[in-house]
Image: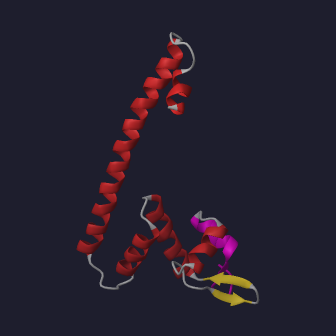
Amino acid sequence: MTSSGTIPIGELSRLTGCNIETIRYYERIGILPAPVRRGRFRRYDTSGVRRLAFVRRARELGFPLDTVRTLLFLAEGGGHSCEQAREVAEIQLADVLAKRADLDRMAVVLGDLVQACGAGDAAGCPLLEALSD
């Protein structure tokens, strides 16, 4: 933080682990409010750091941006309700579990194909043939 109590975008990126282009994108779509500008430079305060960290954690859990907006609204006192947040998280959890089930099915199919390739019993390549069908 500088003496003016603000930090530049590069420092915000370093503090949150969020790419600078992603920060700019979040500003364009309204996930992050427009920062104070000093000339052509963006300057962020501690609330920007906290908000971006919240967004980053939510995205790491797979929440889509529209859902992140909802969570931000709830977290910032806009009708804050743990029940509403739980409902949002339940939907996300169901989506994650469905994706995991899909990945498990894909792993079985790929494992079978890798095993068939490794056996060397078949003429041609079972993996490439399966992908060609």
For the point 34% across and 60% down, the residue is 92
Give the left or right position of residue 43, taking residue 118 as reference.
Answer: right
For the point 30% across and 81% down, the residue is 80
Considering every residue shown, the one lying at the far right of the view is: 39
Q: Nearer the viewer, residue 107 or 15?
A: 107
Q: In the image, residue 39 lies at what x, y percent?
A: 76, 90
Report if residue 11 lies within the magenta region.
yes
The scheme the figure's colours follow is secondary structure
Rendered position, 27 above or below 97: below
User: Which stretch appears magenta?
Assistant: 1-16
Rendered image quadrant of residue 132: top right
Give the left or right position of residue 114, taking residue 3 as reference.
Answer: left
Rendered position, 18 above or below 114: below
Q: Which of 91 and 5 is in front in this view?
A: 91
Numbered circles on residues, count = 0
Give the left or right position of residue 12, taking residue 65 as reference.
Answer: right
For the point 48% across and 70% down, the residue is 55
Q: Nearer the viewer, residue 5 or 100?
A: 100
Report if residue 7 lies within the magenta region.
yes
Considering every residue shown, the one lying at the far top of the view is: 121
Q: In the image, residue 86 lies at what x, y percent?
A: 27, 67
The N terminus appears in which quarter of the rendering? bottom right
Q: In the image, residue 28 lies at what x, y percent?
A: 59, 79
For the point 26% across and 78% down, the residue is 81
Q: In the image, residue 62 lies at what x, y percent?
A: 43, 59
Rendered position, 2 above or below 11: below
Considering every residue shown, the one lying at the far front of the view is: 133
